[in-house]
Amino acid sequence: MNKQKPVIIGVAGGSGSGKTSVTRQIQNRFEDQSVLVIEQDFYYKDQSDIPMEERLKTNYDHPLAFDNDLLVKHIETLSAHEPVDKPVYDYTLHTRSDEVIPIEPKDVIIIEGILILDDPRLTELMDIKVFVDTDADLRIIRRLLRDIKERGRSIDSVINQYIQTVRPAHLQFIEPSKRYADIIIPEGGQNTVAIDLLATKIEKILHEGNGTD
């Protein structure tokens, strides 16, 4: 008997939109099901072949910063019920770490990231495409608090980065990718009605798949 193909869900949205909250809410709804989260942030390109001064100029909010070739390959491998080694990115060296994280395929795979709906190769793999739509003022406040508390950055550096790279990339790439979403969730994890509907849809796909095996 063939194994059922995993349900693949894409959760996109701007930095600080609440993507992680939505992802956690989905995980909490499927405690009896195995849920795997693949963060696009782990798939920044390896930059070990370029000097540090060039690495420091990397715009992490631009599509070219991501190794989507590897991400697509890993999703396809997991969909075929084979394990992969997820890369780890070293933000202090601005390149990929030598470390990897072995991960096993599961029933539900959530791909989370700011630009996962920007690449047609990724969207074609998804059963459900979600965009978390949150006002810009809330997103910048959340990013500010996160970067100061978790990454030890100054207020000035966070604001300068937001103005120079985050906001332009959001307007040019992230916001337009919303058109490819099946479901738009305003205000992220606080929107329990939308998350309930999403969980119901996932359950339906899982049950239909189990019924056809």
Image: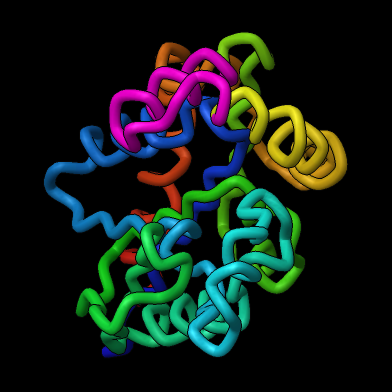
Looking at the picture, how far across and down is residue 48, in whole percent? 49, 84
In the foreground, 135 or 189: 135
Looking at the picture, how far across and down is residue 198, in whole percent? 47, 33
Toward which corner of the image does residue 175 lie, by quadrant?
Answer: top right
Tell me the magenta residue range: 139-157
| Magenta stretch prevailing secondary structure | helix
Looking at the picture, how far across and down is residue 109, in whole percent? 38, 60
In the foreground, 187 or 140: 140
Toward which corner of the image does residue 42 lie, by quadrant?
Answer: bottom left
Looking at the picture, how far across and down is residue 94, in whole percent? 47, 65
**In the image, is residue 17 above or below residue 63?**
above
At x 40% / y 23%, what residue is drawn?
196
In the foreground, 53 or 185: 53
User: From this viewpoint, is residue 168 visible?
Assistant: yes
**In the image, is residue 208 above or below residue 190?**
below
Side of 105 relative to 15 (left or right): left
**In the image, is residue 145 above or below residue 77?**
above
Quarter that holds the N terminus: bottom left
Side of 36 relative to 177 (left or right): left
Asked if residue 151 is among those painted magenta in the image, a careful observer would answer yes
At x 46% / y 72%, what residue is drawn?
95
Asked if residue 128 is among those painted magenta in the image, a careful observer would answer no
**In the image, is residue 126 above or below residue 68?**
above
At x 33% / y 70%, what residue is drawn?
88
